[in-house]
Image (cartoon, rainbow, N blue to C red):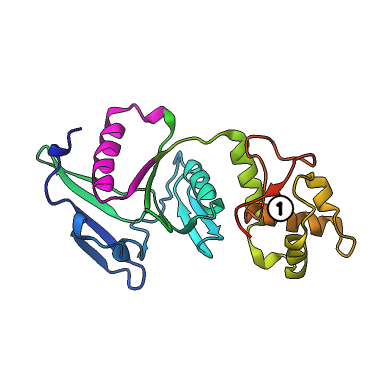
C-alpha cells in the first residue's frame, strides 16, 4: 500500500492510566510520555462460542497483570516478560485512525513494548492469516504509521515450539518474592556453575533441599543470570552458561 494513500492527519486515541480519560491527538504529535502511560484501550471480551482464550497474566516486568486476547498473544507476552531488555509491556495501547482511499480505518495494536531503545509496536497474527488481503492491508498501513514515527513495528506469529515450552516453564519461577534471597545470592556468587549441567547446579548446596535449590536456579534462568540454549528441550543434562544479567 503506497504511503501516499494515507491521510496527512492520522490520529491516536489513548485512555489515561491515571484517570481513564480518553485523549485524542494527531499521531505524529503524540509524545512517548502520552502513549507510554496508558490503560488498555479495550479489555478482553467474553462471549459464548468464542474461538480465542482471553485472560490476564502477572508480568514480572510490570509487577502487575497484563491482559491478552488469545493464547498466541499470551506467547508473545511471555517472551516480552522473559526479555531483560524490556521495561514496559502495555496491552491494547492505543487506537490508530487514518483516512485511506477516502475511508476511515481503525486499528488497535496488540502490545507496546518499551526498552531502553526504540519502542516496539507489536501485532500478533497466526501465520495462516498473514496473506489474507484484509489482514495484510491493516498491517501494512499500521507499519507505515508506526515506522514513520521512528518506532519499530513487529508482526509476530507462532514461535518455535521448543523455545516456547522452555520460556513457558521458566515463567512459573518469575516472581522473585517466592525465593530465598540468601540462596539466590549464594548461587549468583558461585563461579563454578558455568558449563555445568542443570542437575549439578541444582545439587550445589546441602544447606537447602534440592527442590528449593532447583527452583532458585530456574528463577535465575528466568532472570537471565544463567542462560540455556532455547533451541533444545530443557532437561537435567542441559548445560547452563552465564547470562546477560549480573
Residue 137, placed above or below residue 184: above
Q: x, y (%) of residue 6?
A: 15, 42
Q: x, y (%) of residue 73?
A: 47, 45
Residue at the spot of label 1: 218
Q: x, y (%) of residue 201?
A: 80, 51
* Quadrant holding the C terminus: bottom right
Q: Nearer the viewer, residue 140 or 237?
A: 237
What range is drawn magenta here? 128-154
| Residue 116 placement, left or right of 211 | left
Q: Residues within 10 Å of mark 1 (few under 14, many from 20)?
A: many
Residue 96 magenta-highlighted: no
| Residue 173 placement, left or right of 117 | right
- Label 1 element class: helix
Residue at the (77%, 65%) spot, across then down: 186
Count all numbered tags in the image, as a single digit.
1
Q: Nearer the viewer, residue 119 or 72?
A: 119
Residue at the (19%, 61%) spot, across then down: 25
| Residue 31 placement, left or right of 174 | left
Residue at the (56%, 60%) spot, across then down: 60
Q: x, y (%) of residue 108?
A: 31, 49
> Outermost residue toward the front?
191
Residue 208, placed above or below residue 141: below
Amino acid at each position: 500500500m503506497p504511503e501516499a494513500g494515507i491521510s496527512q492527519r492520522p490520529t491516536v486515541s489513548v485512555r489515561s492510566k491515571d484517570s481513564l480519560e480518553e485523549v485524542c491527538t494527531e499521531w505524529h504529535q503524540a509524545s512517548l510520555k502520552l502513549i507510554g502511560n496508558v490503560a488498555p484501550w479495550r479489555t478482553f471480551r467474553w462471549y459464548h462460542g468464542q474461538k480465542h482464550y482471553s485472560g490476564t497474566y502477572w508480568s514480572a516486568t510490570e509487577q502487575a497483570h497484563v491482559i491478552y486476547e488469545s493464547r498466541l498473544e499470551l506467547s508473545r507476552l511471555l517472551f516480552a516478560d522473559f526479555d531483560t531488555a524490556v521495561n514496559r509491556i502495555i496491552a491494547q495501547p492505543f487506537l490508530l485512525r487514518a483516512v485511506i482511499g477516502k475511508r476511515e480505518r481503525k486499528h488497535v495494536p496488540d502490545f507496546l513494548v518499551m526498552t531502553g531503545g526504540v519502542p516496539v509496536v507489536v501485532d500478533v497474527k497466526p501465520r495462516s492469516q498473514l496473506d489474507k488481503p484484509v489482514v495484510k492491508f491493516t498491517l501494512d498501513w499500521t507499519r507505515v504509521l508506526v515506522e514513520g514515527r521512528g518506532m519499530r513495528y513487529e508482526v509476530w506469529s507462532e514461535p518455535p515450539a521448543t523455545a516456547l515450552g522452555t520460556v513457558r516453564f521458566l515463567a512459573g519461577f518469575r516472581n522473585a518474592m517466592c525465593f530465598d534471597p540468601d540462596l539466590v545470592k549464594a548461587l549468583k556468587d558461585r563461579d563454578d556453575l558455568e558449563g555445568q549441567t542443570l542437575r549439578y547446579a541444582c545439587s550445589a548446596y546441602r544447606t537447602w533441599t534440592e527442590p528449593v535449590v532447583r527452583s532458585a536456579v530456574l528463577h535465575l534462568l528466568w532472570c537471565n543470570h544463567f542462560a540455556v540454549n532455547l533451541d533444545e528441550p530443557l532437561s537435567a543434562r542441559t548445560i547452563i552458561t552465564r547470562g546477560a544479567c549480573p
